[in-house]
Image (cartoon, rainbow, N blue to C red):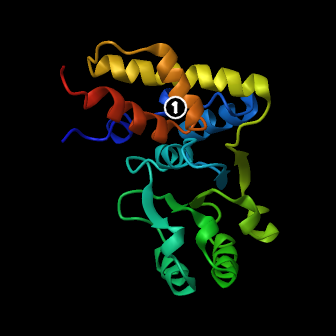
Amino acid sequence: MNMMLSEKYRPKSIEDCVLSHLEPFEENLLRASAKADRPPNLLLFGPPGTGKTTVARILCNPEQYCVSEFNGSLLGKAGVETIQKMLCRGLFHDHRCILIDEVDGITADAQKALRAMMEQYPDRISWIFTANNRNALSDALQSRMICVDFSLSSPDRMQQHADRIVDHCLSILKRERLSDVNPDEVRKIVQMKGFDIRKSLNKLQARYMYRVAA
């Protein structure tokens, strides 16, 4: 069975990500954060499949920082309190990045505990959060982050983003040496999947990699 294309071709740098749905200043912020000595506290929010987790993992580079990653959907108050033990210098890097994916899944009590922790060691701890639903997070927690909206905005930006996703998918299919790829069909699938890159690649993989020869 072939590896999932969405994982095989997951971007390794900000430059490789399809970020045309962001405002230019937001894209510049992410590029600068990836090159900085330490990234700022960031909340990346928006629909699934828009690149939030991919960008977050790029920013939390284990070659630069001591990185700890958690799934917010599985992180209760007790789990958040275990993070407290990590708020110290790492063995190999002075700076630590704590990544919480789907942070909107944590409880209100866990958010309060997390907010208190974020005020400790601000000079050597960066917090990177992703969320599908920004409104599930308290204003107090959000006020401690720079918030980057991964949602699709204007029709013009949506069209530009669709073009970039189609080009991205076609490039991957080409690298897989798949023949008889119909660009119009690729565009239709991208639109049908709501510009979700992961779902689009999954559908294209099923469509073109598992064809039965006539």
Q: Picture coordinates of residue 195 (x, y %)?
A: 59, 35
Q: Quadrant of residue 29?
A: top right
Q: Quadrant of the C terminus?
A: top left
Tell me which residue sits at (60%, 65%) in the image: 103
Residue position for label 1: 17
**How many other residues sit within 10 Å of disc 1, few (<14), some (14-19) or many (≥20)?**
some
Secondary structure of the residue carrying tag 1 is loop
Asked if residue 62 lies left or right of residue 75, the reply is left
What's the residue type where badge 1 is placed?
A: Cys
Q: Quadrant of residue 77?
A: bottom right
Tell me which residue sits at (67%, 52%) in the image: 45
- Tell which of 209 and 63 is nearer to you: 209
Asked if residue 171 lies left or right of residue 38, the reply is left
Tell me which residue sits at (64%, 79%) in the image: 107
Q: Quadrant of the N terminus?
A: top left
Q: Picture coordinates of residue 197 (x, y %)?
A: 51, 36
Tell me which residue sits at (52%, 31%) in the image: 17
Rendered view: 82 above or below 159: below
- Tell which of 87 and 56 is nearer to you: 56
Q: Is residue 141 visible?
A: yes
Asked if residue 97 lies left or right of residue 143, the reply is left
Asked if residue 92 lies left or right of residue 177, the reply is right
Rendered view: 45 above or below 72: above
Rendered view: 90 above or below 207: below
Q: Quadrant of residue 27?
A: top right
